[in-house]
């Protein structure tokens, strides 16, 4: 399989509202660096945490730039969950399958 290029994909940015969660360290970092633009655009998320707001196109509101449709507008200041996400991980392939970018792998049967 060829190496995955995040700028050609962006599937991880297309999620249900409230699921791209923000950590406490993100909040502290954005307050310390005065990134009020990011802080003002958070929504309630799952597990009593805050999350990135989703846009009408179904992706994080920071997804896409004029130069790169799948680039992150806040890449240098992105959240911990985005920093830790691994291209090519099982979750990456699941998100790619959700977007129709690759076939869904059959689930292993239990029992």
Image (cartoon, rainbow, N blue to C red):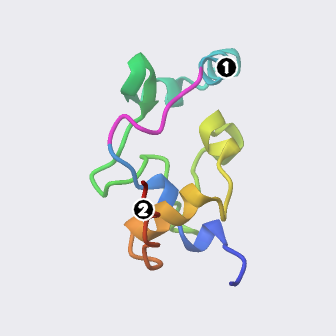
Which callout, 1 or 2, points to the residue nearer the camera?
2
Asked if one can make out residue 31 in the rendered structure from this viewpoint, the answer is yes
* Magenta residues (range): 17-23
Q: Main secondary structure of the magenta part?
A: loop
Q: Which residue is labeled 1 in the image?
A: 25
Helix, strand or loop at mark 1: helix
Left or right: 83, with 43 as reference point: right
Whether residue 16 is in magenta: the answer is no
Instruction: Relative to 2, say whether 9 is above or below.
Output: above
Residue at 68% x, 54% y is 86
Residue 72 x, y percent position in the rendering: 58, 53
Q: Residue furthest bottom?
A: 1
Q: Which residue is labeled 2 in the image?
A: 109
Residue 27 x, y percent position in the rendering: 59, 19
Residue at 59% x, 59% y is 90
Residue 26 x, y percent position in the rendering: 63, 24
Left or right: 41, with 71 as reference point: left
Left or right: 100, with 102 as reference point: left
As drawn, the label of residue 85 is none
Residue at 42% x, 62% y is 109
For marks 1 and 2, the one nearer the N-term is 1
- Residues at marks 1 and 2 touching, judged by CB atoms closer than 8 Å: no
Asked if one can make out residue 10 in the rendered structure from this viewpoint, the answer is no
How crowded is the residue under tag 1: few (<14 C-alpha within 10 Å), some, or many (20+)? Answer: few
| Image quadrant in which the C terminus is located | bottom left
Quarter assignment of residue 28: top right
Whether residue 19 is in magenta: the answer is yes
Helix, strand or loop at mark 2: loop
| Image quadrant in which the N terminus is located | bottom right
Instruction: Relative to 37, say whether 58 is above or below.
Output: below
Residue at 44% x, 31% y is 51
């Amino acid at each position: 399989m060829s190496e995955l290029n995040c700028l050609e994909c962006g599937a991880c940015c297309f999620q249900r509202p409230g699921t791209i969660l923000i950590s406490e360290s993100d909040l502290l970092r954005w307050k310390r660096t005065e990134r009020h633009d990011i802080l003002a655009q958070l929504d309630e998320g799952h597990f009593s945490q805050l999350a990135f707001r989703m846009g009408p196109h179904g992706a994080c509101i920071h997804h896409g730039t004029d130069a790169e449709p799948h680039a992150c507008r806040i890449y240098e200041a992105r959240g911990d969950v985005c920093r830790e996400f691994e291209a090519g991980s099982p979750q990456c392939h699941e998100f790619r399958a959700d977007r129709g970018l690759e076939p869904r792998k059959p689930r292993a049967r239990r029992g």
